[in-house]
Image (spheres, grey):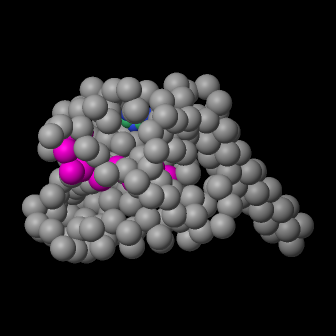
Amino acid sequence: MAYFLTFIALFLAFIGTLIIVILGSIGTYLIFAGKFMRFSPPVPSSGRTKKALLQDAAAFLEARQNLTVVDLGSGWGTLLLPLAKKFPQHRFVGYELTKLPYFISRWRGRKLANLQFKRQDFFAADLSEANVVFCFLLPAAMQKCQEKIVPRLQNGAVLYANRFALPNVAPTRSESLGSAYETYYVYYIENKV
Ligand SMILES: C[S@@+](CC[C@H](N)C(=O)[O-])C[C@H]1O[C@@H](n2cnc3c(N)ncnc32)[C@H](O)[C@@H]1O
């Protein structure tokens, strides 16, 4: 009996330690990813903002055919997966550099022929075909997007920026669901006449 109780106690201690180590590793990864990596941490769009963003983009996509939809830093695939499922007539491309979210998003989207995740720096990607672009990036990256991405987008493209706006471009409209943290910005690109 004593052996049995000792075994149960050791087993529970082992499981407890394992859970602490796994949760600690995930927490540390997310904190350090945000602090030390050059780019935004893999925090997904969420809650009311995510829902509103998806509805907004869906209304745009519904009325059109054969568009290319891009997520600049696609994270876990939070935005592209539901849209790719809903709109087989459009093509969806996510660029993601961080390994874990990239591999998970690829696995989650493995059955969708119109969805592709690329482990690539989006600043080096060819975005000339993009009709709809999502981003949810920290202010420094938004500044760089304004300088390097926006001028390369085609006329008529739509950019959805979650939470952080382009620093020096007035949005065509912005939608707030409460606080500034629950705001997204929409830009209709008019680069070339
Ligand atoms: C805040 S998350 C947003 C994820 C997703 N777009 C969403 O809304 O749920 C930003 C993601 O961008 C990725 N990222 C940042 N800079 C990048 C770059 N230059 N190229 C590719 N991915 C990048 C980060 O790894 C992170 O996963």
Residue 184 point in image, percent of width and height: 50, 57
Residue 98 to residue 132: above or below:
above
In the picture, measured across the screen, residue 55 lies left or right of residue 24, that is: left
* Near-viewer residue (184 or 97): 184
Q: Is residue 160 magenta?
A: yes
Please state, as top left, top right, bottom left or bottom right, where the C terminus lies in the image.
top left
* Near-viewer residue (48 or 177): 177
Q: Is residue 79 magenta?
A: no
Please state, as top left, top right, bottom left or bottom right, where the N terminus lies in the image.
bottom right
Confirm whether residue 161 shows in the render. yes
In the picture, measured across the screen, residue 99 lies left or right of residue 17, that is: left
In the picture, measured across the screen, residue 27 lies left or right of residue 191, that is: right
Residue 141 point in image, percent of width and height: 48, 32
Q: Residue at x 77, y 62 (%)?
A: 12
Q: Residue at x 33, y 59 (%)?
A: 80
* Near-viewer residue (112 or 92): 92
Residue 102 to residue 67: above or below:
above
Q: Which span is picked out in magenta? A: 153-162
In the picture, measured across the screen, residue 19 lies left or right of residue 105, that is: right
Residue 109 to residue 133: above or below:
below
Picture quadrant of residue 138:
top right
Q: Residue at x 16, y 63 (%)?
A: 90
Confirm whether residue 75 shows in the render. no
Q: Residue at x 21, y 51 (%)?
A: 156
| The residue positioned farthest toward the right in the image shown | 2
